[in-house]
Image (cartoon, grey):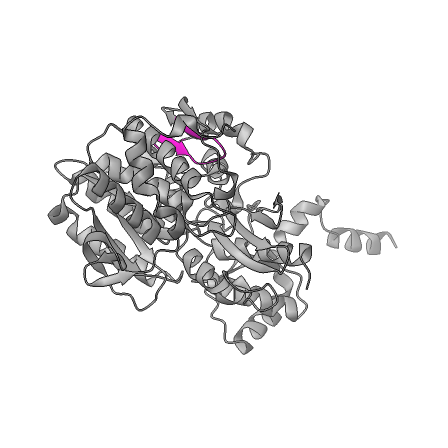
Amino acid sequence: MTFLRKILGRRQPPARSKDQWGDRGRGLLVFDHTSEVIRAESCLRKEGFQIRIKGPPPGLSTGCDMVIEFPLIQELAVRRALAEAKINLKSVVAVEGPLLEPVSLIRVKDFGDYVMVRAANMKLTVDKRDGLIVNVSGGGCPDVPYLADALVGKRLCEAPEPRSLGHTLCGYALQMAFEEVTRLCPG
Amino acid sequence: MVGTVPDEDFPLVEGPCRMTDSGLVVSQYTLKVARGTPALLAAACLTARVMGIQNPRALLAGDIGVGHGSSRIYEYLSRSLEALSPRGITFHYIQPDLDWHNRILLKMEELSTRPMLVADAGYMYVAKMSGYASSYDLFTPDVGEMAFLADDKAPHPFYTRGFLTQEEDQIPQLIQRAHKTGGSAQHLLVKGRCDHIAAGGRIVEIICDPCVEAMEPIGGTGDTLTGLVTGLLAANLPLLDSCLKAARANRLMGALASPTPASSVKELLRFLPRALEDLLRGEGWEAERQC
């Protein structure tokens, strides 16, 4: 019995905090373009994977990008899902420290007949009376003017979701504003 | 002025730009002015006309966020900077790319006369991220972007940490912090309900009047401000004076247009020449509604 306890005891992992274990079990999916991250996020969420959008660690960051954090144990299944969706994965790396979180605070400003929603550096303004998107402002990445052209003048119910056309973090932030304003002005 | 237009097929174009009855013309192309770099160019051209100087030059490429047009711009600039020998450059909607940014900055440092450098939008993001923000003469952020400049860890406004409040009353602290942590250009023109002008981390001017609330949601009103500054700098006005006049003229343009949140920047731009002329004559803005 003592012998058995010794063997089992040796097999037990040393005491670690939950975070340390969590770090050791997380991986990052790295892509060449933010548009691929956006597509991969949609695909993996649809497949039921527990994933999170994060800022890349400094060594991986090129300027306007994000990565997907996922449980490393699911790497094979994740790779398979991405391959089936024909999404090009650049690499998988293990998480080695804390990562930057996307902005989560969304601000709403009331202009009477209009409501403006700001997410990170992007603002989306809608006519409350008919759900017409009247303006898109803020941002700095080149897909912002492109997205604005696609959205302004359309009703929320008929406008394309920014994530379906966007390629950058600004496009991603605009999606957050779009979701909030859709929640505020349903129908 | 260096930036992109939201059309994938638009080629790399470099040349003088001008405002005509049919719109903004660069080389043989007529551009729609809705927001972004075309709004910046339109404001700078109108300013140049009022100031009686030559039209500014533009370097443009089509980019819808994939970065191909931005790459062509970076590549062209790195090859042609010496031949162009600009007196000043305003960088605008360009896909942030750290490696290219640093190469361009190095090229600029090698020029016999270093150009005055203004950065807004995506290029301001990458300039800050590079750690060389102080090499720039002027950044023109809004309050959200100001919080990003003050966050020494964030590579993009999307990752600005929550403890840096993006509220207008925090602007003085954000300016100080950005200066201290190396995220600020030598001068800042922070666009907001009140515009803040700062030099070396200290606020030198706050402009609140006229206050036109509806300008905030209108896409392109920040771009017109940067365009005004660019035009005034091209007319050899000192930097702080250019910021001050640009902030006042942009606000006056808004007041003259009486916009709603559904207005377009194109509607506002019609009033830019009158706003600037009124301002330069020392008229107009003092009489407007106070915030």
Q: Position of residue B165 (x, y in %)?
A: 57, 34
Please state which of residues B114 and B170 is positioned toward the viewer in this rendering.
Answer: B170
Residue B187 placement: quadrant: top left
Q: Residue furthest bottom?
A: A84
Residue B28 placement: quadrant: bottom left
Tell me which residue sits at (35%, 47%) in the image.
Answer: B269
Please state which of residues B57 and B247 is positioned toward the viewer in this rendering.
Answer: B247
In this rendering, the answer to whether B149 lies above or below A89 is above
In this rendering, the answer to whether B195 lies above or below A178 is above
- What is the magenta range? B182-197
In this rendering, the answer to whether B170 lies above or below A168 is above
- Judge whether residue B195 is colored magenta: yes
Q: Position of residue A124 (x, y in %)?
A: 54, 52
Please state which of residues B157 and B56 is positioned toward the viewer in this rendering.
Answer: B56
Image position of B120 (left or right of A34): left
Q: Position of residue A119 (x, y in %)?
A: 56, 48
Q: Position of residue B24 (x, y in %)?
A: 27, 56
Image position of A15 (left or right of B176): right
- The answer to whether residue A102 is seen in the rendering is no
Tell me which residue sits at (37%, 61%) in the image.
Answer: B6
